[in-house]
Amino acid sequence: ASTWANVPQGPPDAILGITEAFNADSFNQKINLGVGAYRDDKGKPHLLPSVQKAEKLIFDSRLFKEYAGITGIPAFTKAAAVLAYGKDSSALDRLAITQSISGTGALRIGGAFLERHYPGAKKIYIPNPSWANHAAVFKDSGLEVAKYSYYNKDTIGLDFEGLVADIKAAPQGSIFMFHACAHNPTGVDPTPEQWKEIEAAVKAQGHYAFFDMAYQGFASGDIHKDAFAVRHFVEQGHNIALAQSFAKNMGLYGERIGAFSIVCADAAEAKRVDSQIKILVRPLYSNPPIHGARIAEKVLNTPELYDAWLLEVKDMADRIITMRALLKDNLEKLGSKHDWSHITSQIGMFAYTGLTPAEMDQLAKEHSVYATKDGRISVAGITTANVGRLAEAIFQVKG
Ligand code: PMP
């Protein structure tokens, strides 16, 4: 028999299944709301002008393709830290930071670091629901995964009481993972006031906070506003861990560029933590790829490109915010009796519609509208040209 005769067939990826069904549909007005990537108003992928200019500068300078250090390109990690924590943050002088294989790689390094060095229970609490990959990443890092209350399906909003109660109920010194902004899949974020209460509860329990910030700037259009939770926790004395991604806010998806950082007590501790991050990364992939880091570094460190980029991120965020409003307007114009205010109060790439798996099936089968069964739609897939038909489809399914 073959060596691998007993390897069982694994289940297909949920998103890939949607893409396959979408591709197989011959209707010319089919709509794909499954993809987690930005699309312009023509439904096309988007290359940011600031990124194109940075690439041209990099190309023209004919850089060598030498290895980066284990933790990546310092000009990049320094700029990524300033972007996340703020230029005047006390964290910057006591930060251990490494370049990572986008946000996923950052989470994985974080999971591995916690598994190896966290002094308390090796268990991480993630929101219910959370990005589908979180549980897998942390399990494969060797952590136990538990869930805390997050989403209230009756209000299609935040279960704030449940969330705070779960923080308080978890054993002292537990690890809590938070989505810094634009919670995926729900699009439901705590308000700044709620973040303050969450911070107080986390502090009271002596928990450790690990933030996943995959959408800085992409949520509200303002990089500072989107970093509120991260910066607030640091200001309140939490030595957080942070995963950053430049996939969405720079449109660098396939370049796989991100960063993982740990705020330490002081520079000496940061140096020790940094040495251990290197010991983790070296046997994983030796050192990270350089091209995406060069692009992000160029955009962040060149004042004209940085200013242009801020506007470009805002444009992307604004287009999404506009599509949310248009979808809600269209549903109301059709006479829908449902309250669709969650569509516009949610934030980021995704909207949680509140549609059931059966209704999502019906959307696909009868209206050629494809998205995940949990009722999540990628707002980035909505355009001025398809929003009318989308609203009609939802109205026919949901009323
Ligand atoms: N965290 C969250 C919440 C995400 O939505 C994503 C992307 N879908 C990621 C992390 C990681 O993405 P990437 O590895 O492409 O940066």
Image (cartoon, helix red, strand yellow):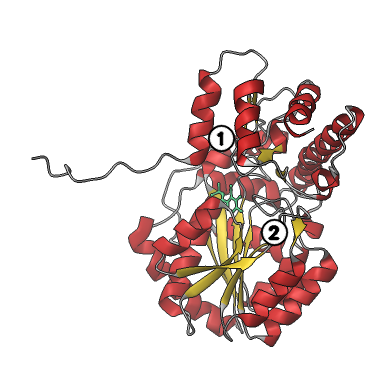
Mark 2, Cα crowd under 10 Å, few <14 / some 14-19 / many 20+, is many
Residue pointed to by mark 2: 151
Amino acid type, label 2: Tyr
Q: The N terminus appears in which quarter of the rendering?
A: top left
Q: Residue at x 45, y 57 (%)?
A: 136
Q: Position of residue 281 (x, y in %)?
A: 40, 63
Q: Position of residue 22 (x, y in %)?
A: 55, 24
Q: The C terminus appears in which quarter of the rendering?
A: top right
Residue 181 in the image: above or below residue 392: below
Q: Position of residue 208 (x, y in %)?
A: 60, 78
Instruction: State which quadrant residue 369 falls in.
Output: top right
Q: Residue at x 73, y 76 (%)?
A: 199
Residue 26 in the image: above or below residue 268: above
Locate residue 239 relative to residue 329 in the image: left or right: left
Residue pointed to by mark 1: 59
Amino acid type, label 1: Phe
Specify whether residue 180 is in view.
no
